[in-house]
Amino acid sequence: MRALLAALTSLARSTELFARSNHPHELNFLDFCKLIGFTQVTVTNGKDVAHQIKIQ
């Protein structure tokens, strides 16, 4: 899951929203989710494991 979140961070940093930030290299995927209004993220493989992250 950490690798997936790292990959999503890499993809998020290529967006215009991150590009407008003063320090885009300091932000991660969860910061991106917060910026666009998410309050919760669930990462799962659909079978064995699920991890829920609350964003405040």
Image: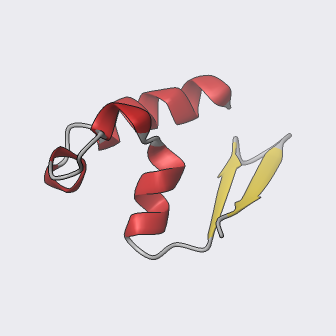
The quarter of the picture where the C terminus appears is bottom right
The quarter of the picture where the N terminus appears is top right
- Location of residue 39 with respect to 14 vertically, above or below: below
Give the residue furthest to the front: 22
Give the residue furthest to the top: 3
> In the drawing, does residue 25 fall left or right of residue 54?
left
> In the drawing, does residue 17 fall left or right of residue 42?
left
Q: Position of residue 18 (x, y in %)?
A: 24, 48
> In the drawing, does residue 21 fall left or right of residue 42?
left
Query: Which of 50/6 is in front?
Result: 6
- Location of residue 18 with respect to 39 vertically, above or below: above
The quarter of the picture where residue 3 lies is top right
Measuring 46% from the left and 61% from the top, which residue is drawn there?
33
Q: Position of residue 11 (x, y in %)?
A: 31, 36
- Location of residue 24 with respect to 31 vertically, above or below: above
Q: What colouring does the structure picture have? A: secondary structure
Q: Position of residue 6 (x, y in %)?
A: 51, 28
Q: Position of residue 26 (x, y in %)?
A: 41, 35
Measuring 41% from the left and 55% from the top, which residue is drawn there?
32
Label tally: 0
Measuring 32% from the left and 43% from the top, which residue is drawn there?
12
